[in-house]
């Protein structure tokens, strides 16, 4: 089975431009998570969805960031307008249904390395 | 709020040495899960182990072993006879079980960079 798929793998853009990161979770998984990794702050959860519904977006840094999950197999993270401080690696992860069972491990995609100049 | 502390920022060992990575956590919940992830130089995050708060039995998987001690809120990771391929950043993470059976978010430590020299 394919793992979590993210695109693009690398993105270089100029300050002020809109950036859209894409994620396809593992088939059958019903939870999806967006993380950001920087040297200064480590791995931070930005937002997570359960059954396509945003559950917790308290990690989204500001209104320039938005995320959507229109269906169970696709999610986007958009930054508009982008700024140099948004430069980071953005990871998408998914996890399978719990059906009353405890939380399970998250499976991470390869990440998108974003550079904003 | 939950918190994960990995006090060791970097560790450097020589191949075949044993090495222990420390992880200390804080949580108010009685039900929670602890994880270790590996991030090799290629950048992807690889799941290594999950442990629940009710199971304090230590676990061994090949050269890897994990020591979970609830009394000290620690979940340490030992690599025996380290190899160059073990060089990576290792993250400890904590997850609380969300209400309604929904998956819940992971809180990660800052990670420990392990370098194994030949």
Image (cartoon, coloured by chain):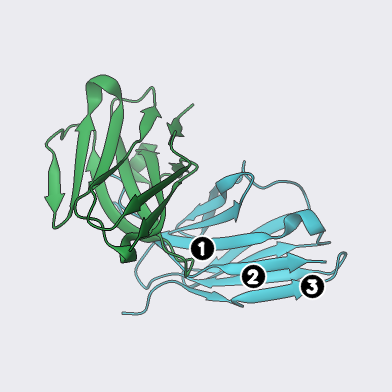
Chain colours: A cyan, B green
Label 3 belongs to which residue?
Answer: A13
Q: CA distance from mark 2 to mark 1?
A: 9 Å
Q: Which mark is residue A20?
A: none
Comparing B29 with B117, the one in front is B117
Q: CA distance from mark 1 to mark 3?
A: 20 Å
Q: Residues within 10 Å of mark 2 (few under 14, many from 20)?
A: many
Q: Are marks 2 and 1 in contact (CB under 8 Å)?
A: yes
Q: Position of residue A76 (x, y in %)?
A: 62, 67
Residue A34: quarter of image = bottom right
Label 1 belongs to which residue?
Answer: A92
Residue A101 seen anywhere in this rendered image of the structure: no
Residue A82: quarter of image = bottom right
Element carrying mark 3: strand
Residue B70 seen anywhere in this rendered image of the structure: yes
Q: Position of residue A65 (x, y in %)?
A: 72, 55
Numbered disc 3: what chain?
A
Q: Residue at x 59, y 72 (%)?
A: A22
| Left/right of residue B109 with respect to residue B18 in the rendered view | right
Element carrying mark 2: strand
Numbered disc 2: what chain?
A
Numbered disc 1: what chain?
A
Q: Kindly report which numbered mark, 3 or 2, lies closer to the viewer in this rendering.
A: 3
Q: Residues within 10 Å of mark 3 (few under 14, many from 20)?
A: some
Position of B118 relative to A60 (above/below): below
Comparing A42 with A49, the one in front is A42
Element carrying mark 1: strand
Q: Which mark is residue A21?
A: 2
| Left/right of residue A49 with respect to residue A36 in the rendered view | left
């Amino acid at each position: 089975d394919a793992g979590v798929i993210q695109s693009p793998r690398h993105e270089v853009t100029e300050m002020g431009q809109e950036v859209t990161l894409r994620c396809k979770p593992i088939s059958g998984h019903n939870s999806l998570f967006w993380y950001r990794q920087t040297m200064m702050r480590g791995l931070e959860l930005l937002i997570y969805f359960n059954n396509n519904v945003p559950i917790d977006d308290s990690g989204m840094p500001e209104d320039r960031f938005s995320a959507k999950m229109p269906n169970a197999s696709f999610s986007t993270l958009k930054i508009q307008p982008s700024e140099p401080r948004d430069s980071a690696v953005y990871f998408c992860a998914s996890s399978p249904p719990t059906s009353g069972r405890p939380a399970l491990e998250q499976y991470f995609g390869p990440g998108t390395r974003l550079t904003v100049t | 709020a939950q918190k994960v502390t990995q006090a060791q920022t970097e560790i450097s060992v020589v191949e075949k040495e044993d090495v222990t990575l420390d992880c200390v956590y804080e949580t108010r919940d009685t039900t929670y899960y602890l994880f270790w992830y590996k991030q090799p130089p290629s950048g992807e995050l690889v799941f290594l182990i999950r442990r629940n708060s009710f199971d304090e039995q230590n676990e061994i998987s090949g050269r890897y072993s994990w020591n979970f001690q609830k009394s000290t809120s620690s979940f340490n990771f030992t690599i025996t006879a380290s190899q160059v391929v073990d060089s990576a950043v290792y993250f400890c993470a904590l997850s609380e079980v969300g209400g309604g059976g929904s998956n819940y978010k992971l809180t990660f430590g800052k990670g420990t960079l392990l370098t194994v020299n030949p």
